[in-house]
Amino acid sequence: MKTPCLLFISAAIIALGAPAAAQVALPNGPNRDLVAHICSACHDLGMVVGTGGRSRAGWNGTIDDMVQYGLSISPEERATVLDYLATYLPFRG
């Protein structure tokens, strides 16, 4: 008897969390779709947007970290992603 109740509660929690996750989006700008595709391949975009921004050097270091975790990105894509992140998600101190 407890199992159906737990399944219902689990489904409700997941359903409530889904709209919140779907609302996270990168700021509008050129190459936003490319950045979203590359970044969301490994994690939720909330991790990118929720950083509070970074300097260009900070974003460059973050991309280095992601490459260490297995991100496969061409030099051209990397430059595009870095330009986007530094422009549309800058450090706000």
Image (cartoon, grey):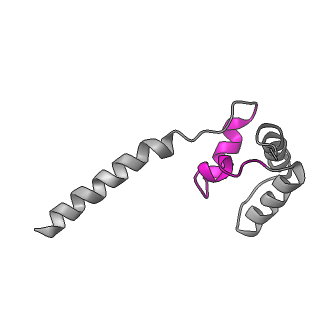
Q: Give the image quarter of residue 28.
A: top right
Q: Which residue is at a point 74% across and 30% down the rendered structure image?
A: 29
**In the image, is 3 to the left or to the right of 19?**
left
Establish if 60 lies above or below 86.
below
| Residue 21 image offset from top left, x and y in percent | 49, 46
Q: Which residue is at a point 70% across and 52% down the rendered structure image?
A: 51
Residue 6 part of the magenta-drawn span: no
| Residue 30 image offset from top left, x and y in percent | 76, 31
Q: Which residues are drawn in magenta?
A: 30-53
- Of the 4 image quadrants, the one containing the N terminus is bottom left
| Residue 42 image offset from top left, x and y in percent | 61, 58
**In the image, is 5 to the left or to the right of 65?**
left
| Residue 55 image offset from top left, x and y in percent | 86, 49
Establish if 70 lies above or below 9.
below
Q: Nearer the viewer, residue 22 or 92?
A: 92
Residue positioned most to the front: 93
**In the image, is 15 to the left or to the right of 79?**
left
Q: Which residue is at a point 34% across and 54% down the rendered structure image?
A: 13
Residue positioned most to the left: 1
Establish if 30 lies above or below 42.
above
Q: Nearer the viewer, residue 90 or 45?
A: 90
- The mark tally for this picture is 0
